[in-house]
Amino acid sequence: NSREGGAISFGLDAPIAVDYNFGLGAFAEDDGSSSFGGFVGAGFGYTTTTSTTEDDYNSTLWNESDISKARSYGPMAHGGIRFGLGENGNQITLKLSYKKGLEKEKYNFFGATFLFGF
């Protein structure tokens, strides 16, 4: 938890997307002829977060914590690129994603992912 005074946080991002893959890593039976590849996709996502923080009204009898939650759903899109590393089959994937919130609060989520695969 990066919030000051926070004890624990939990987050879940559950997208359902259709992707178009190309080049390196697009197929399980890749012949290794490409050293670059990528993907683009779109779909629908659901995100929820929960965190606890110590309250400002602690008493000598007990300590309480407040729980805050945020839920969001809406259309999402993502895309990324893959690079091959040498001849041993390792790959690096860089991905960017965005989800537009449709709920009353209109939470929008941006994401970045770095993956290293063997």
Image (tube, grey):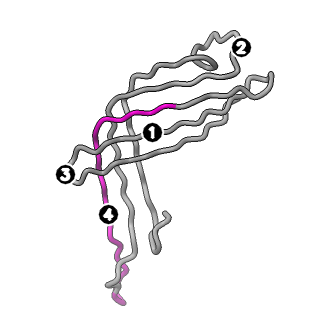
Q: CA distance from mark 2 to mark 3?
A: 48 Å
Q: CA distance from mark 1 to mark 2?
A: 27 Å
Q: Is residue 6 above or below residue 81?
A: below
Q: CA distance from mark 4 to mark 1?
A: 24 Å
The residue beneath circle 2 is 32
The residue beneath circle 4 is 68
Q: CA distance from mark 3 to mark 1?
A: 21 Å
Q: Is residue 36 above or below residue 2?
A: above
Q: Which mark is residue 104?
A: 3
Give the SS element for disc 1: strand
Give the SS element for disc 3: loop
Disc 4 crowd rating (10 Å Cα; few below 14, some 14-19, many 20+) is few
Disc 1 crowd rating (10 Å Cα; few below 14, some 14-19, many 20+) is some
The residue type indicated by label 4 comes to: Ser
Are the residues at dot 4 and dot 3 in contact (C-beta closer than 8 Å)? no
Q: Foreground residue, 81 or 47?
A: 81
Span shown in magenta? 59-79
Left or right? Give the position of 80 relative to 10.
right
| First reached walking from the N terminus: tag 2 or tag 3 | 2
- Image quadrant assignment for residue 28: top right
* Image spot of residue 2 (x, y percent): 50, 65
